[in-house]
Amino acid sequence: MKVPFVDLTALSSDIKSEILRQIELVSQDASFILGKEVELFEEEFASFHQVKYGIGVNSGTDALYLSLLACGVQPGDEVITVANSFIATALAISRVGAKPVLVDIDSQTYNIDVDKIEEVITSKTKAIIPVHLYGKPVEMSTILDLASHYYLKVIEDACQAHGSFCDGKFVGSIGDVGCFSFYPGKNLGSYGDGGIVITNNEEIATSLKLLRNYGQKKKYYHSRLGFNSRLSTVQAAVLRVKLKYLVEWSKLRRAHAKFYKQLFADNVLITVSIDYDFLSHVYHLYVIRVKNRDSLQNYLTDKGITTGIHYPVPIHFQEAYRYLGYKVGDFPITERYADEILSLPMYPELTQEQVIYVADKVKEGLHNAV
Ligand SMILES: *Cc1c(COP(=O)(O)O)cnc(C)c1O
């Protein structure tokens, strides 16, 4: 049996043809840039999250970057985020000219350790970027308290967590702004690059609309130094179709995760992360922790199972970030987990047989390694 890590071709043929029909309509209209589909998708995505504004942009990275600018973060400022995330979280901070200040992960949630944030806040700190990694929400109440006490902006990196919620609120709608990616492999993926920022703050929304479109107030009148970072109309059309299925797809992901968990329950060699009732995990990734991770990964590859590691090199160990001056031991949990984490196949269309096969081979591989 072959089990890919994700399978973007597994989309049902009904949905595929619905998408192609919508793309055809955009092409008849030839409204490729900021066409009406963009505005409609922005409204639908914002209303799904029960927020006022959605501003489509060309990637999750730009959603973060433009949000930092719209929140007034400037060169020399500091922005706090987590040591284990996709590099784009830190890159967005650097691109503003600000300094990424990292915090270790919590050993139970695998997300930013909220109890270690306050000790790195300085007079230069302007914002916190919590990352809802793997699709699991960060517990936001501590972060919101710190933000209001120290006058910091909260920019949620929800690029892996479309549709998950914390205490009854969708992630992305809890802080000042929420950033999403529509990279094809994400829980809501387009047919290319794409992203969106959501917010209830009118000033930030207005600013983002200018920034993504050459700083343009009306055609050829530019009030800000802006960029070209728009969500394309074709992508918006694709996303409007897919958004209707997001809740259903999240349910399927959760069901697969529950099944994996059951199958691993009696195995002392496998650690699965703990779930909390007030957090809804949407399992962008299903991550286990094991000793002998690399040999298990090779074993699974031999058995036709593709896996991933998110992430093998923490941000503070990346060559590009050597200048930050962090050293081995600064973020012990992140560093230890980087050698133990393994992401198993996870996508809505995964079958029960595939989950059973993967779980069997994981147990087999670990048994052989002992
Ligand atoms: C994917 C991702 C991004 C960047 O999104 P792009 O659309 O690829 O630019 C940022 N942060 C996290 C956590 C991500 O997973």
Image (cartoon, grey):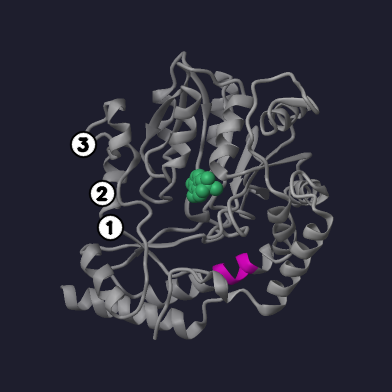
Which is nearer the eye, 124 or 308? Answer: 308
Q: Does 252 lie within the magenta span?
A: yes
Report whether 370 appears left or right of 144: left
Q: Is residue 19 magenta?
A: no
Residue 115 percent location from the top left of the image? 43, 34
| Badge 2 amino acid | Arg
| Label 2 residue near ligand 1, CB within 8 Å | no
Rendered image: mark on residue 340 = 1
Q: CA distance from mark 1 to mark 2?
A: 7 Å
Q: Amino acid at mark 3?
A: Val
What is the three-letter code of the residue carrying label 1? Glu
N-terminal of the pair, mark 3 or mark 2, is 3
CB at disc 1 and ligand 1 closer than 8 Å = no
Q: Over which residues does the magenta segment extend?
A: 249-254
In the rendered structure, are the residues bearing label 1 and label 2 in contact, judged by CB atoms less than 8 Å apart? yes
Between 40 and 336, which is closer to the camera in this rendering?
40
Asked whether residue 132 is in view, the answer is no
Q: Which residue is mark 2?
A: 336
In this rendered view, identify the residue nearer to me: 163 or 264: 163
Q: Position of residue 136 (x, y in %)?
A: 52, 53
Residue 262 appears in which quarter of the rendering? Answer: bottom left
Q: Nearer the viewer, residue 294 or 190?
A: 190
- Element assignment for label 1: loop
Q: Main secondary structure of the magenta part?
A: helix
Point out the tag, 3 or 1, that comes first from the N-terminus.
Answer: 3
Q: Which residue bears the numbered disc 3? A: 328
